[in-house]
Image (tube, rainbow, N blue to C red):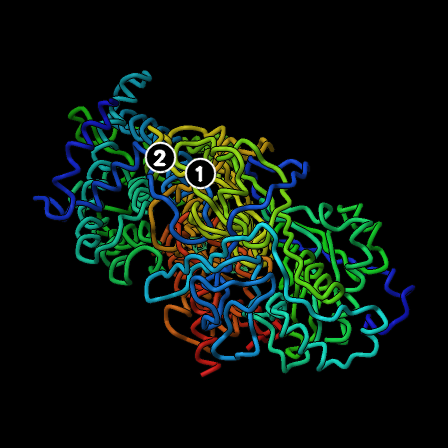
Amino acid sequence: MNPVRRFFDGLHPHVSPGGKYEKLYAFYESIETVFFAPLERTRRLPAVRDSLDVKRYMFLVIVALIPHLCFGIYNAGYFARMASGLSLAPVPVVLTGLWLVMPMVIVTYVVGFFWEILFATIRKHEISEGLFVTCMLFPLTLPPATPLWQVALGISFGIVIGKEIFGGTGRNFLNPALTARAFLYFAYPVSLSGDNVWSVLVGGAERYVDGYTAATPLSVAASTTDGQTVEAALEALGYSPLELFFGLYPGSVGGTTTFLSIVGAIFMIVLGIASWRTILGGVLGVLATAYFLNFIAGPDSMPFLSLNPYYHLLIGGSAFALVYMTTDPVSGTHMNGVKWFYGFMCGLLTVLIRVFNPAFPEGVGLAILFMNCFNPLLDYIEVKIRTRRRVPNV
Amino acid sequence: MALNLPRQHLRRMKKIRNRKGYDLNISGAPSDALATLSVPATVAALPERIPFIKPRLRVKTGDPVQVGSILYEDKTDPRIVFASPGGGVVGDIVFGPRRVIREIVIALDQEETAVTFPALTETDLDGISRDDLVARLLEGGVWPLLRELPFRKIASPDSRPPSIIVPLDAREPFRPSPERYLTEETHPLFVFGLNVLKRLSDKLIVFTDPRRKGICRTFKNELTHTIEGRYPADDPGVLLYHLRRGPEDNRAWFIDGQDLLLLAGFLRRGTLPTERLFVVGGSGVAERQHVRSRLGAPLKHLVLAEPACPEPRYVVGGVLRGYRGNPEGHAGLYETAVNVLPEATERDFLNLFRPGFNKPTRSRTFVSAIKNVPMAMDTNVNGGRRACIACGYCSDVCPVDILPQMTLKSILAEEVEEYLAHGLLDCVECGLCSYVCPSKIELVETFRQTKFEYHKEQVS
Ligand code: SF4
Ligand code: SF4
C-alpha cells in the first residue's frame, strides 16, 4: 500500500469520534485531502458532480502566488545584502532571502492554522481552504523586516476579527489578509512604515552602507517637491520604469512586482477563479482617477498630481492588491454587475489616498477594506434590481 | 392564442435562445439502435414516485387485474386514479419506511386482458364536451400524465391552464431521443393528441431543439417554438420562463411527448397502451441503446447486459434528475431512462497536484477543460462540504436566472417573501447548481424541499 496512505490510516482511528484527538478531525481531513482525493458518494441529486472542489480552487490561487513568493525571497535578500554592503551573488542573495522570508511564512501558517482549527473545532465545521490563501497573501504584503511576533499578532487579528467573529469563511465581509495587514499598520506604525523597514540589515551590519537609499518609490513620489517631476525623481534614484514594472525595489515581500501580478491575473482569469470584471474595473479606476488628477493639476500643485497614470500601477502594491485582494470571492462583491463598480472604486480610492493623504503612503489596502464594507449593500442593490425584473411566481 | 390561428401561421415557429445551462461532458451515451425486449414477468406501479399525492390502494395482493384496472387513487382527490400497466395478478406490494407504498407489482398473465372504453375518433372528439373529455381521461387513469408547473404535480382537473407545453427534446444525459418515438408512423396519433390538448387549453406550445432536423421536418405544422441552447433547454419550465408575460402564465401544464402518445392512444383505441420506450445509458453498462419495453418494466429487465463495473448504481431518469433506483425494482410511470453509473471507489493520490486530463468539469481548473471528449463520471461528490465561497458558478449556469447562492441564504433565514421574489418557484430542478458547486452544497435538494414545504402550506 501507498506509505502515505498507511500513515493516514494509522492516524485515522485517533481522530475519529471516540479517539484521543477527535477534536483534530477537521485538521486531519484538511491535510489528508491534500494527498488523497476525497471519496464520498452522492446521496442526493444529482448523482454526478463536477470534479472541482474548494480545495483545488484555492490551491490554484496559491499556485498563482508562488512566483510572488519566490520573487519576494530574491528581492528581500537582494536589498538586504545591498543595504548591508554584502556581495550580491545569486546564491547568497537567495539564502538571505529565504532566511528573511520563510520564517514569516511559516509563522503565519502555524498561527493561522491554530486559530482555524480552534474555531473549526468549537463550531464543528470544516477547515476552509480559503485559509491557505490568506496565509500566503499576508506575509507577501509585509515589509521583510517585520518582527515575527508582529506577524503572529497580525494574522491572529486578521483571522479572528476579520473572519471568525463574523461566522467564519463565507460570512466575513472583510478580506482577512488585508485586515491583518491594516491592523499591523495602525498598531505598529513605527516598525511598519517609514523608509527604514523595507530593507533589513543582515550579516552584522549596523547601518545602511553609504549611498544606499531605502526610500520606496511611493515615498519618493509623495515627497517630490516643486520643480521636479516624480518620474525624474524616481529615475534619479535608479528606479527606471522597467525596474518598477518588474518590482526590483525595496518594498513588501511579494507585492512590488506588477509583472508577476499581470501573469497571475491572466492565469486566474483563464482558469476562471478570479473575476476579470473586478480586476479590469480596478485598473480602470486607477487610470481614470490618475488621468483626472493630471487634468486638474496646475503649475503649482504637487508633482504627484501630474504623475503619469501608469506609474500608479507600477509603484507600491496596487497591482498586487487589485489582482489578489479585490478578487477574494467572499469579501468582494458577489454579483457580476457591481463587480465593475467595486473594482473601479478600489482603484479610485487607492489613487486618492496616495496623493492626498500624506499619512498613508500606500492606499490600496485601505481602499479595498473600505469598499469591502459596502459590498453587502452593493450586492443587495443588484439583487433587488434583478428580482424586480422577474415576472413574479408565487 | 397560437392555437386558434390557422395552420399556416403555426409554421412560423418562434425561435428562442437559452443562454445559460450546461451540457455535461459525460461518456456512456446510448446508441440510436432500438431493441424490442421480450415481455417481462412483472411490471409495477410506483406510487412513491408520484409527487404530492397521498396514495390509497384499491387492490390487494392476489387480486386479478387487467391492463387499465385501477390500482390506487389519490386520497386528496379520489377522481385521480392510476391504471395498471399490465394484466395478471397483484403480487407483492412493497412498503417503505412510514408505510409509503413503493411498488405495486403485477405478475403478468400469458394472455393479458384490458379494461375497454369506447374508442374516440377525430369526429367524436369534436363532439365531446371538455368536461366529458376530462372525465374520460380521469377514469382511464391517464390523467396523471398531465402535470402542472411550477410544482410539477398532477394537473388539477378543475382548472383551465393558460397553456399546455409539449417538449419534444431530450438534452439530459441520457434520455430517449424523440426521433425514436416521433416518426411518420406516430405522427397522426400525435396530432390527435394535440387536438385533445387543444380542448383542454386555449394555448398549445410544442417545441424542440432546431438541431433536431427530423422532428422539425415531420412536425413542422405542429411545432410552435424552437429553443436552442444547452441543457435544460428541453424543460417546459425553461421555455415558460422565456415566454411568459405575466404571473397568470405561470400555472402552465405540460406533458412529455411519449406520454402524449400514450394518452392519445388510450382515447383512440379505448385501451391503455402499455408500450414504453426506454433508454439504457451510462458508462457503467456496456450495452447502451434504446429499448422498447413495457410501462413499469423491471430495471434488471431493461439493462440487458451485466453492468460493466463492480459496483453499479442504477439511476432511474437522467444523471442529473434521476434518482437512485433499486436494481430489483421497476420503472415508474414517468420514467423513460435507466443510466448505470459506476459507484465511486478510488481515492486518487495527489489528485490536487495533477493537471487532470480526464476530470470532467465545467470550470477551467483541469486540463480536461480544453479537450472536448466525453469523460466517464462516477458517483463521487469530488470534494468535502464547505461554506459557500461565492464563486458564482451556480448563478452562471442557472437556466432561469435564479441566484442560487442568494436564494439559499434566504431559505436558511426563512425569508419566504424573499426567496419567492428570487424566483424559487421558477426553479426547474435541473440540478446544475449542485453539480457545479465547488463547495458541494446541496442546492437543488434544498430548493426541491422548500418548494415542497411551500406547496404543503399552500394547500393546507
Ligand atoms: S436553481 Fe433550479 S433551475 Fe437554477 S440551476 Fe439550480 S436546479 Fe437548476
Ligand atoms: S457554486 Fe456553490 S460556492 Fe459557488 S456561489 Fe454557488 S453556492 Fe456558493
Q: Residue at x 48, y 33 (%)?
A: B306
Q: Is disc 1 in contact with disc 2, using a CB cutoff of under 8 Å? A: yes
Residue A81 % position (x, y): 27, 25
- Confirm or reject: label 1 Cβ below 8 Å from ligand 2: no
Q: Is residue B346 left or right of residue A260?
A: left
- Mark 1 is on which residue type? Asp
Q: Is residue A342 above or below residue A274?
A: below
Going from the N terminus, do you reach mark 1 or mark 2 first?
2
- Confirm or reject: label 2 Cβ below 8 Å from ligand 2: no
Q: Mark 1, chain letter?
A: B
Q: Residue at x 87, y 72 (%)?
A: B5
Residue B9 % position (x, y): 89, 65
The front one of B33 and B457 is: B33
Q: Is residue B339 above or below residue B359?
A: below
Give the labeled residue for mark 2.
Answer: B345
Residue at the extreme left of the image, as rendered: A20
Residue B115 appearing in the image: yes
Mark 1 residue crowding within 10 angstroms, few (<14) / some (14–19) / many (20+) = many
Residue A75 % position (x, y): 34, 29
What distance separates the C-alpha of mark 1 from that of mark 2? 9 Å
Residue A180 % position (x, y): 27, 51
The front one of B349 and A45 is: A45
- Mark 2 is on which residue type? Thr
Give the labeled residue for mark 1.
Answer: B378
Q: Mark 2, chain letter?
A: B
Q: Is residue A140 left or right of residue B9?
A: left
The front one of A286 and B145 is: B145
Q: Residue at x 82, y 71 (%)?
A: B3
